[in-house]
Image (cartoon, helix red, strand yellow):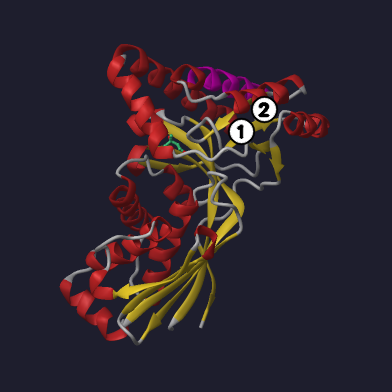
Amino acid sequence: MKKITVSAPGKLMLFGEHAVVYDRPCIVTAVGQRMRATVELTDQPMFQLNAPDVKVLNYQKPMSDLGKGDIPKGAKFVEIAVKNFLTNQSTSEVKKMQLHLGGVRVTTKSEFSSEFGFGSSSASTVCTIFALSKLLGKKLSQKQIFDLSYKTVLDVQGKGSGFDIAAAIFGGTLYFVTGGKVIKPLKINSLPLIIGYSGIKVDTVSLIDEVKEKREKYPFLIENIYDQIQKIVEQAKITILNKDWVSLGELMNVNEGYLSTLGVEGKKLADMIYSAREAGAYGAKLSGAGIGDCMISLAPPSKAKAIKKAITQAGGKVLDVKTNVEGVRVESRV
Ligand code: MEV
């Protein structure tokens, strides 16, 4: 086999953002919009990448230069993923692989905009490592794929809990603790969520840094908030499994209160969240780093139309999103 196409889902954080960066749990669900990657083994010892969604066209360099020099932003995750996959193998394995491996050509295509905060970088990292393991006949467990992908994210951006990587690999809805210390699938079918996109692009790393500054200045306050968020997540886990949507909505609202205290709510998201609640949602909160990206609301079907209208009137765009979908998978191989 010389060529494989794989796909991995995007993600939405349900509970526990920010606290999960500091050794607390969160709950994340995998979404129906997927990242696809076609990975080919080529004769020439070159790394080639086309990722039109992030404006990377015909990027190439010798395999021996992987990870070196100035790497365009949109190419970083895939390039470092290839490098990490190869350097992780034992010397004899690498020798064996190099018999197959001249170069690697990767083409990614996303079904979602990289602006949504669905985790396009993480999904393309996971696709790259998964595809290479299949192409080169290297059996990796889901946890090994997680560890390599998470290392890649940390190499590129220096921080992050890895929850988005876990969602891309395992799919479904997960209870997750920082760095993959716990990754526990929650057995549910779907969640009655309505998603609103704010149209505001945020830089997750800068927001993590802002919250970090607050934590350094007021550790006694912020650690307390993280402890409370942890309690919300533990309760939300039970509530999700019981399909008690009314209580889950209330927990969303409580979680949002703490996120507002951390300073990551932002006016536009707040408008969308309050509009959804006023239109009859059980609860609503931001999802992810905050300030921009998306908000989520949990709603009885009878109120869905009114809530969508309210989110739109507040300036948001309702996204049609399936939740709890399958993790990384092979689409086709040649
Ligand atoms: C960003 O989507 C969620 C954060 O908790 C960061 C992370 O967990 O990596 C803010």
**Image coords of residue 150 (percent x, y):** 34, 50
Residue 43 vertical placement versus 227 (above, below): below
**Image coords of residue 318 (percent x, y):** 71, 40
**Image coords of residue 233 (percent x, y):** 48, 27
Give the amino acid type for the residue marked by disc 2 in the picture. Answer: Met
Residue at image location 55% in from the left, 18% down from the top: 254
Q: Secondary structure at mark 2?
A: helix
Q: Residue furthest front?
A: 70
**Image coords of residue 120 (percent x, y):** 50, 53
Queried whether the magenta region covers residue 18, the answer comes back as no
**In this view of the protein, which residue sits in the foreground, 256 or 332?**
256
**In this view of the protein, which residue sits in the foreground, 141 or 288?**
288
Q: Is 97 positioned to the left or the right of 55 in the image?
A: left
Queried whether the magenta region covers residue 254, the answer comes back as yes
Q: Is 138 positioned to the left or the right of 331 in the image?
A: left
Residue at image location 36% in from the left, 40% down from the top: 160
**Badge 1 is on which residue?**
295
The residue segment tinted magenta is 246-258
Camera sees residue 172: no
Question: Main SS of the magenta segment?
Answer: helix
In the rendered image, which quarter is residue 93 located in? bottom left
First in sequence: mark 1 vs mark 2: 2
Give the amino acid type for the residue marked by disc 1 in the picture. Answer: Met
Residue 198 vertical placement versus 55 (above, below): above
Cβ atoms at labels 1 and 2 below 8 Å apart: yes
Q: Is 169 positioned to the left or the right of 70 in the image?
A: right
- Label 2 CA crowd tier, 10 Å (few <14, some 14–19, many 20+): many
**In this view of the protein, which residue sits in the foreground, 133 or 164?**
164
Q: Secondary structure at mark 1?
A: strand
Q: Residue furthest left?
A: 91
Residue at image location 35% in from the left, 12% down from the top: 221
**Badge 2 is on which residue?**
272
